Image: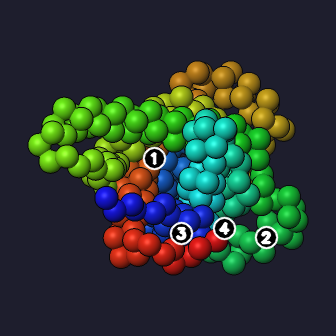
Amino acid sequence: EKIVRQVSNGERLLIGGTARAGSQLALYPIDALRTLAQTRAGAKGLKELGVKSLISGAGVTSSFAYFIGALQFATYGALSQTRLGPLGASAAGAMASSVVSIPQEVLKQRLVSGIYPNFYSAVKSIWTTNGFRGFYTGFLPTISRNVPFVILTFTTFAAIESHILKMRTQQQSTNAHENGKTTNYHLSAIESMQVGIVSALLASLLTQPFDVVKTRMMTQAASNAIPYRNIRDCCLTMLRTEGLSSFYKGLPQRSAYSSGLWALQFGLNARLTNVLLHNHPTTAILPC
């Protein structure tokens, strides 16, 4: 029986990065709508900013997504079969990718909300005003969102995938006498997309309040309201002036974006992995 090799860490970086960058670029306008829905009262909306705001910074900030996806999928793939398991591996992937994802979010959300006219002005202004630390504005709420979101998405995906493959193995065992062979089953790209949608929708619902607080902290300059002093002040002010429902602003837009993003990521990841293993069944193209 032919034994198919596993992808290397280098290949995981390549596949994960490509899947993430392509997916984010395709769904960028939906994510922009989520940002505009979550900004504070007094900030400009789509009517004032124009349709062009939905693609402001799309190309440049989506290039950051390559490294986000590469770190997430490579870290998860390398650690998920160790003692850390899917839970620890997904947490490690979220922490590793946050090094890139937080600056990307700061730049993306400020470009979309009209705080800066272009990428160069955004980088220059943030660096001049706040230095390196400015690119990590909203670090705590972003980490508080990213880590549980990625954990929920990857572990839910792994649990559903395991269940599907277990059922297939049982069916295969029942019919094994017909051919005497065993097959190494994997989810197809379409199945991976379907499971990715379910996983991301669950994660989006449970982490939405953190996402809103993150957006508020990153886009304060878009509104003429008195700035929040810190995360606690942001939460208390939102609760007092806008009510509990304010923590779920932009949920439809974020759900559409996240489910689409992770469906495409998991689907493309599965498809690219299958293509790579088919074309290079014995030798890794990136052996590291």
Q: Which residue is mark 3?
A: 11
- Foreground mark, 2 or 1, reads 1
Q: Which residue is mark 2?
A: 125
- Foreground mark, 1 or 3, reads 3
Tell me which residue sits at (63%, 48%) in the image.
79
In the rendered structure, which amino acid carries the disc numbered 3? Glu
In the rendered structure, which amino acid carries the disc numbered 2? Ser
Measuring from the top left, give residue 200's x and y in whole percent. 45, 40
Q: Classify 10 Å Cα crowding around label 4: few (below 14), some (14-19), many (20 and above).
A: many
- Foreground mark, 1 or 4, reads 1
Measuring from the top left, give residue 70's x and y in whole percent. 58, 63
Q: Which residue is mark 4?
A: 116
Q: Classify 10 Å Cα crowding around label 2: few (below 14), some (14-19), many (20 and above).
A: some
Q: Which residue is mark 1?
A: 258
- Label 2 or label 1, whichever comes before in sequence order: 2
In the rendered structure, which amino acid carries the disc numbered 4? Tyr
